[in-house]
Amino acid sequence: MHYLRHLQPGIDHHAITEIHEQRQRWVNQNKKGFLRYRTPFERLRAHRASLTDCTADTVTIGGSDELSSESRQEIREQLKCFMPWRKGPFSIFGIEVDAEWRSERKWNRLRDRLPDLSGKIVADIGCNNGYYMFRMVPHEPRLVLGFEPSVQHYYCFKSLNAMAGFDNLHIDLLGVEHVSLFPQSFDVIFLMGIIYHQSAPIEILRDIFTALKPGGTLLIESQALPGSEPIALFPERTYAKVPGTYFVPTGKALENWLLRAAFTKVELFCAHPMSSAEQRRTEWMEFESYEDYISPQDPALTVEGYPAPWRVFLSAVKP
């Protein structure tokens, strides 16, 4: 837990350490569900790339000429163990990993709105395999801490960063519900693709407000309804086949949530409809994707008959 030394002394060190140790005991069990991801991590961590590049749309870790064809094939087989790959693209020792989401599109929408990250303490809540964390590296943050409770994504990031070797990127098996343990700790918090999975979204935003330093920035991205009315959909069971979806807001509703949570300078700076050009099946994600979530009779509707999703991006500041 080397990341704790970078954080404010006012955080709850005891509670964070206790949760960390509990989850490490859990994830280190010699059970099939954990070994499924821990074993490829242990094999991949033996390889250290001499080339890394996080400036382009594809995060590059290692070149194809750094390893033998046999080693590259072994790495490919181990990377396949982390399927389905949700975020990307990556190039790992010349192995092109085309993830379900073309995550570079989301990053490029955020890029011009990034606050100064140089020397800053950043949290990426729900960081998945760390694609956005790697994209932050060229901005020279002091620390990026990824909150990620999924064992699959946790070990995928650890494998990638073991090969890349960035010592300012860290991950822990924490969820958004743990952010309240980090009062006034972060200069910037990224909350992307998370808020609509929360049954009490305003309370989560208030916890994030508490975790930001005064003057800190929240960058939030969410699935959304089209339209300008301040409303949110509460689906009966699923939305676009996704369980665990609670409130799907319009951009205006999300703006109001942020204001209710005491944020200022709230700005909706991007809104766009989703499409299968951005979220789709690939060799590295072979299951259902966006085109399967939309009504075949009317692309303006989900399979449940709800309005098809947009994505919205907002920034907000803690005064």
Image: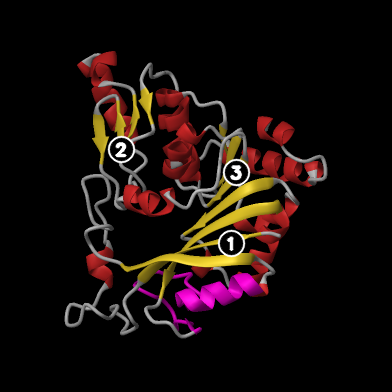
Disc 2 to disc 1, how far (Cα)?
28 Å
* Residue 55 on image: x %, y %: 37, 34
Labels 2 and 1 touching (C-beta < 8 A): no
Labels 3 and 1 touching (C-beta < 8 A): no
Mark 1: few/some/many CA within 10 Å (<14, 14-19, 20+): many
User: SS of the residue at dot 3?
Assistant: strand
Q: Three-letter amino acid code at disc 3?
A: Val
In the shown orientation, is residue 284 left or right of residue 155?
Answer: left
In the rendered view, tell whether residue 266 sits above or below residue 105. Answer: below
User: SS of the residue at dot 1?
Assistant: strand
Which circle marks residue 164 in the picture? none
User: SS of the residue at dot 2?
Assistant: loop
Quarter of the image for residue 25 reads top right
How many marks can you see? 3
Quarter of the image for residue 297 reads bottom left
Nearest to N terminus: mark 2 or mark 1: 2
Front residue of 135 and 41? 135
Disc 2 to disc 3, how far (Cα)?
22 Å
Determine if residue 232 is in view: yes
In the shown orientation, is residue 310 left or right of residue 197?
Answer: left
Q: Name the residue under label 3.
A: 122
Q: Mark 1 points at which residue?
A: 316
Q: Three-letter amino acid code at disc 1?
A: Ala
Disc 3 to disc 1, how far (Cα)?
15 Å
Q: Three-letter amino acid code at disc 2?
A: Thr
Front residue of 278 and 139? 139
Nearest to N terminus: mark 3 or mark 1: 3
Nearest to N terminus: mark 2 or mark 3: 2
Q: What stretch is highlighted in magenta?
A: 230-259
Identified at 82% across, 45% down, the residue is 10
Q: Name the residue under label 2.
A: 58
* Residue 156 on image: x %, y %: 43, 38
